[in-house]
Image (cartoon, rainbow, N blue to C red):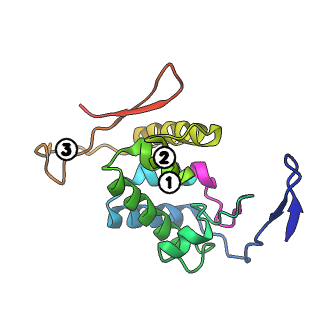
Amino acid sequence: MVHADAKTGRLVRAVVAPAAAPVPPAQLNQLVDNIATEQGVEVPLVQSVILAESNYNATAVSPKGAQGIMQLIPSTARRFGVSNTFDPADNIQGGVRYLRFLLDYYNDDYTKAIAAYNAGEAAVDKYQGVPPFAETLGYVRTVAKNLAAARQKQPKAANPVPAKPGSPEAPSHIKVKVGPDGLTYYTTP
């Protein structure tokens, strides 16, 4: 389907999502937990990206052609092995693989990884950080806010045994802060 964009007047091609049975929220949460854990990506980060991208709408299609719950553009979907962007499990699997790739590529720099999820690696590399695009700046702030809220909701272990620093079990202790300049800063102790 093709329609005119209200702001620019340009023709925009929209993909009509196939009818899919709604996935219960508990099942979506379980998918996110399982896939994120399997890929070694922080569950609250995946939840935060999904909330910012589609608000858990598995049939979402953006004006730019991004599809599904994690809003994968077709080339990114193919790149990360997604055959059906409207299948929540397939879409989440591809989106989390992409996040894992970005976290590895940017040495666990959450700000760059989140910016690249929105604007692409080329833009983040070109600007050596968050590109100065209003959409990307807003996206990084939104995901950071969602991440801080999601981390607050995480259940605490009854008697946690602290992991040794540097061990794979050690938590990342990443702090999220929005600075006076409106940028989001992630810090570790």
The span from disc 1 to disc 3 (Cα, nearest Å) is 41 Å
Q: Bounds of the magenta span? A: 51-62
Residue 107 belongs to the span the image colors magenta: no
Callout 1 amino acid: Ala
Label at residue 122: 1
Which of the 4 image quarters holds residue 84? Answer: bottom right
Observer-nearest residue: 102 or 95?
Answer: 102
Observer-nearest residue: 128 or 139?
Answer: 128
Q: Position of residue 145 (x, y in %)?
A: 51, 36
The span from disc 2 to disc 1 (Cα, nearest Å) is 6 Å
Give the secondary structure at mark 2. helix
Label at residue 126: 2
Badge 1 vs badge 3, beta-carbon distance below 8 Å: no
Q: State the residue at coordinates (63%, 55%).
A: 54
Observer-nearest residue: 164 or 125?
Answer: 125
Q: Look at the magenta stretch and give its main secondary structure.
A: loop
Label at residue 104: none
Marks 3 and 2, the one that precedes in the sequence: 2
Query: Relative to 66, is 178 on the left or the right?
Result: left
